[in-house]
Image (tube, rainbow, N blue to C red):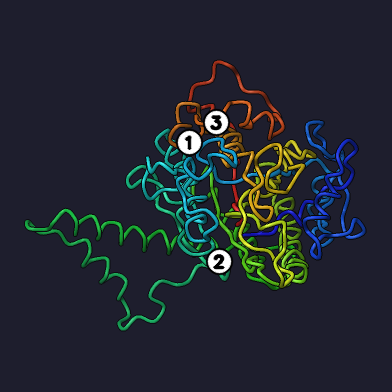
Amino acid sequence: GMDSYNMLVPYTCDSIDVYGNYEEIRGSVALPKTRLLEIQSGNPAQPCTSFGIHENLPVLKNLYDNGELNFVANAGLLAKPVSAVDYRGETPVQLFAHNAMVAETQREDLADEFVGTGVGGRMVDVLTQAGIPANTFSIDGQQVIVTGEAGEGPAQIVVSGNGVPEFNADPSINNMNDVIKALNNATTADSGFYAETWSSKFCEAIDTQQTLKAEVDATTVTFPFPDSSIADQFAMVTRIMQTRINRGSKRDIFYVEDSEYDTHSNVDEQLVENFSRINGAMDAFVDELKHLELWESTVVIQFSEFARTLDPNTGDGTDHGWGGNHFMFGGAVNGTHVLGHYPIDFNEGDADRIALSRGRMIPTTPWDAVWKGTAEWYGIPAAGMDKVLPMHNNFPLSSLFSETELFNPPVSAESSEATAEEALDHHSLGRQIPLSH
C-alpha cells in the first residue's frame, strides 16, 4: 500500500486551501512545496489548478509535461459508489488488509462471477475467443491479475527478471527431456481424462518454455537499467516484447511489482528510497521502448491495493488506508490531466462524506474507470466488457473513462464498416500493457 498522497500533493488551490488542509492532517510527514515538482492540473473540475509530484519522481513530471502521462486522483477498489454512511455494507471485501485487497484489486470481480480470474486474464480471454493472438506474462511469480478462465485463453507465462531458465538444466540422462515427453504422450485404453489433460498441458508448457527461452536469449537491451529488482523486471518486459512477432502475438499484458511500500514508520525516508529506485527503472524503460519503436503501442498502468492514512502515526509512518492517487503513461496516452476528484477535506465528517478516521479516504473513482478506457484501447468490444469488468455497470457512465478520454486517436482512422475482427486487430504491431504494482 503506497503512500500516494505524498506522491501527488495539492499545490496551488485558489478557492479552497487544499494544501493547507493537507499540511494540517499530514503533520510531521507533510511535504513542503520546495520538495515538489509542480504540474498544472489540466482539469478545471479539480480543486487545485496545480499539483506537486514528489521530488524523487522527475520522470513522471517529464512524461506529464510531454502529454504522455495522466494521474488518477483518489481511485481504488469499489463494488459500487459508496460514502461514509454505507461503505461497510456495500463493499464486500476485507478493507485495509493487504492479502484481501491485493487479490481483489487484481481480480476486479467482487461478486465472484468469474472465480479465480483477473482483469488482465479476462481481457486476453475475450481477444482469444475473437481470434486475436494475445498472451499474459508475470515477471513476479504467478498472479491472479493475468489469469483467465480455463480453456478460454492461454495460460499466463511466469518468468523472472533474470531471464527464462533452462528446463531441466541438469538432466540425469542425455535425452531426459525426450523421455519425459514420450512418457507423457503415451496413451492407453484406460488413460483417464484428467491424466491426459495434465500430460498434454505439461508437454505444451515444456515446448512454450523452450521456445520462449530461445527467443528471449536472442534479444538485447540497448539502454542501461539500474541495479534493482524492478529495473530487472522492466528490462525483461522489453526483451519479451521483442519476441512478439516470432510468437505471433498481437497483444501482450505484463505484470511487474515493486515492494517495500508498507511504510508504518519513517515514511519520508522510505519514499525517497523507493521513488528513486522506481524512477530510475521507469526512465530506462521509457528510453528502451522508444528505441524499440514500441512507445506508441504501450501503456503502463500503476496501481496499489490501497493508499495510507493521511494522519501519521507516532513513528512518522502511515497506516493502511483506501483510496489513493495513481498514474498511467505511454506514447498513445492523452496526457497532462489529473483525472478523478482530488479530495478537499481529509477529516472525518467532511461534507462529501468520503473521509474516514485518520484520513482514510473512500475512493471516488473506481478501478473500473481506468480499466474500461484501457480495455477499449486494447481492443475489447462492448460485448466483451461485461466479462472483463463485471462490476462496471454498477457505476454511472460519467464516472468511467472512455478510450477517447484516456488515449489519443490512432494515426489512421478505421473505417466504420470494419468487421469485429478488423476492429480488434487494427494495429499490426500489437499493444502492450505492463501493469506496475
Q: Position of residue 355 (x, y in %)?
A: 66, 46
Q: Amino acid at mark 2?
A: Asp
**Badges 2 and 1: C-beta atoms under 8 Å apart?**
no
Q: Amino acid at mark 1?
A: Met
* Quarter of the figure with residue 221: bottom right
Q: Position of residue 294 (x, y in %)?
A: 67, 47
- Which residue is tagged 2? 217
**The N terminus lies in quadrant:** bottom right
- Which residue is tagged 1? 391
**Badges 3 and 1: C-beta atoms under 8 Å apart?**
yes
**Residue at x 84% of width, y 51% of height:** 52
Q: Amino acid at mark 3?
A: Phe
Q: Between residues 161 and 401, which one lies in front from this camera angle?
A: 401
* Quarter of the figure with residue 317: bottom right
- Which residue is tagged 3? 395
Mark 3 or mark 2: whose residue is earlier in sequence? 2
Q: Between residues 331 and 87, which one lies in front from this camera angle?
A: 87
Q: Secondary structure at mark 1?
A: loop
293 shown above or below 7: above
* Quarter of the figure with residue 206: bottom left
Q: Position of residue 307 (x, y in %)?
A: 65, 55
Q: Between residues 323 and 168, which one lies in front from this camera angle?
A: 323
